[in-house]
Image (cartoon, rainbow, N blue to C red):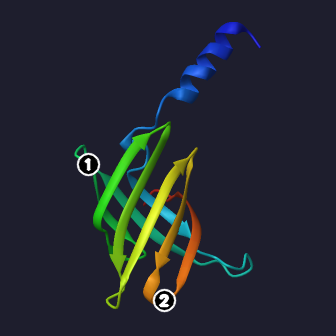
């Protein structure tokens, strides 16, 4: 591999993602069985002040925050089902999002992935 190509690859690998790369519409795959797909929408808006707004699993995001550090761009936020809180943390990994959601009142942690939602026609 030519030296210039290796240098450019190293520079790009160290460039942290920007908030715009995580903002927008996502399709969250919550499937526990590949034969039975289960997806829900997620919409994220990352503001310059470090806040996150939008919705996850059709619930409004509360107290959302984002941070770009150590080459990663991540969000954390809270939603509710009307009974108790759901705490979510997720990071952009390449072209997708990897996350987990904890619901203490439901006694579970859910690990999920999300892909960019198809544009609306």
- 1 or 2: mark nearer the eye: 2
Mark 2 lies on residue: 106
Q: Is residue 75 visible?
A: yes
- Disc 2, SS: helix
Instruction: Give whichever of 118, 79 is nearer the camera.
Output: 79
For marks 1 and 2, give the CA distance: 31 Å
Q: Quadrant of the C terminus?
A: bottom left
Residue 21, image quadrant? top left
Packing grade of label 2 (10 A; few <14, some 14-19, many >=20) is few
Q: Residue at x 37, y 46 (%)?
A: 67
Q: Residue at x 39, y 54 (%)?
A: 24
Q: Residue at x 48, y 75 (%)?
A: 102
Q: On the picture, is 7 further left or further right than 28?
A: right
Q: Earlier in the sequence, mark 1 or mark 2?
A: 1
Residue 101 image point, x, y percent = 49, 72
Q: Which mark is residue 16?
A: none
Is 43 placed above or below 109 here? above
Q: Residue at x 55, y 20 (%)?
A: 11
Q: Which mark is residue 47?
A: 1
- Disc 1, SS: loop
Residue 100 image point, x, y percent = 53, 67
Q: On the picture, is 82 further left or further right than 1?
A: left
Q: On the picture, is 80 further left or further right than 92?
A: left
Q: On the picture, is 91 further left or further right than 82?
A: right
Residue 45 image point, x, y percent = 31, 54
């Amino acid at each position: 591999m030519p030296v210039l190509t290796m240098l450019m690859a190293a520079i790009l690998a160290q460039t942290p993602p920007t908030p715009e790369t995580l903002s927008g519409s996502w399709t969250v795959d919550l499937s526990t069985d590949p034969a039975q797909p289960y997806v829900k929408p997620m919409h994220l808006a990352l503001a310059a002040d470090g806040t996150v707004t939008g919705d996850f699993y059709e619930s409004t995001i509360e107290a959302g925050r984002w941070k770009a550090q150590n080459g990663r761009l991540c969000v954390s936020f809270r939603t509710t089902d009307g009974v108790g809180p759901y705490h979510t943390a997720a990071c952009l990994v390449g072209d997708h999002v990897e996350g987990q959601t904890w619901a203490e009142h439901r006694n579970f942690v859910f690990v999920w992935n999300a892909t960019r939602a198809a544009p609306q026609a």
